[in-house]
Image (spheres, rainbow, N blue to C red):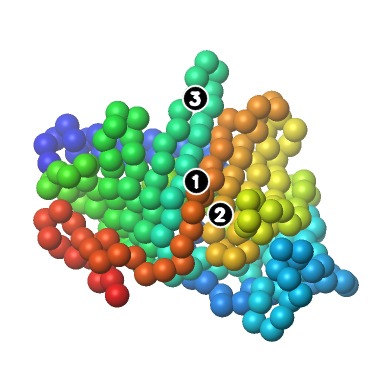
Amino acid sequence: MDTKRSWAAIGFFAVAALLVALMLTHTLHRATRITLPAEETAAQDPARGDGEAGELTLVAVTPQTVQAAVATLERPEEYCRAVKVEQYWSGGSGSYEVTVTVRSPWSRTDRTLPDGRTRHTLTDSERAYIWYDSESTVYEAPAGSVSADREQTIPTYEDVLALPEGSIRQADYRLLGDETCIYVETGDEEDTLCYWVSTRTGLLAAAERVVDGKTAYWMESMESELRSPAAGAFALPDGRVLQETA
């Protein structure tokens, strides 16, 4: 890779890290059955039927109990999904889509850039490999701040666990399409961050940042499949395979 492209890749790392830090800036595992912490009375989820054995058990979530609820969620070790991010600023807006492929510890993101190119990133939190479109040249470096979340520019919902008492304004269950989610709202009336975390997958299903009553950021997962990645998902253009797939 030429010097200009190398510096461009390094610069992207810095910009992406700053962007996600401003957003609020997740590891990968999944519990087969998630039981959320109960208060005195369990609240049956209307979207889950009669709560037969083996099904997800949902109970009351409030601003006081939501951190314990979120702490029970784990991300799946294998999944594939597509994410759309929309950003709004004074006088303009922009959007992009990212496909995400994970088989722990490796994650791959394929992001369509505003100029039409596609940025591919593979990382295991220790090393990062980046290339563009169908080019054979790969930029390789220590992962540093590079992660699947930052490559998608999505907030890390686990940061909810570190929030001080009283900073969570609202928490409950909400449907996002057909997906049952734990909803968490933090911040203040001038700057609010909202999370929708899927109880089915343990993944962030949507996020919104509202500044002075207007949406500044919106992220939504358009689809999530808990399945093994396709063959070759973790192969580099030069033929190296970083993670075998089933």
Q: Is residue 118 above or below residue 73?
A: above
Query: What is the three-letter code of the residue carrying label 2?
Result: Leu
Q: Secondary structure at mark 1?
A: loop
- The mark nearer the N terminus, 1 or 3, is 3
Of 179 and 91, nearer the camera is 179
- Horizontal relation, residue 48 to residue 90: left or right: right
Q: Hey, which quadrant is residue 80 in on the image?
A: bottom left
Q: Residue 131's spot in the image, x, y percent?
A: 21, 45
Mark 2 highlights which residue? Answer: 204
The quarter of the picture where residue 132 lies is top left
Q: Are marks 2 and 1 in contact (CB under 8 Å)?
A: yes
Which quadrant of the figure contains the N terminus?
A: top left
Residue position marked by numbered label 3 in the rendering: 93
Q: Marks 2 and 1, how far apart in space?
A: 9 Å
- Graded by Cα atoms within 10 Å as few (under 14), some (14 to 19) or many (20 or more), the crowding at tag 1 reads many
Few, some or many residues within 10 Å of mark 2 (<14, 14–19, 20+): many
What residue is rendered at 71% in x and 81% in y? 52
Q: Nearer the viewer, mark 1 or mark 3?
A: 3
Quarter of the image with the C terminus is bottom left
Q: Of marks 2 and 1, which one's residue comes earlier in the chain?
A: 1
The residue depicted at 11 percent of the width and 36 percent of the height is 2
- Tell me, yes or no, if residue 96 can be seen here: yes
Look at the picture and state if 182 lies above or below 58: above
User: Which residue was labeled with disc 1?
Assistant: 154
Q: Which amino acid lies under the numbered mark 1 shown in the image of this protein?
A: Ile
| Secondary structure at numbered mark 3 | strand
Around disc 3, counting alpha carbons within 10 Å, would you say few (fewer than 14), some (14 to 19), or many (20 or more)? few
Quadrant location of residue 113?
A: top left
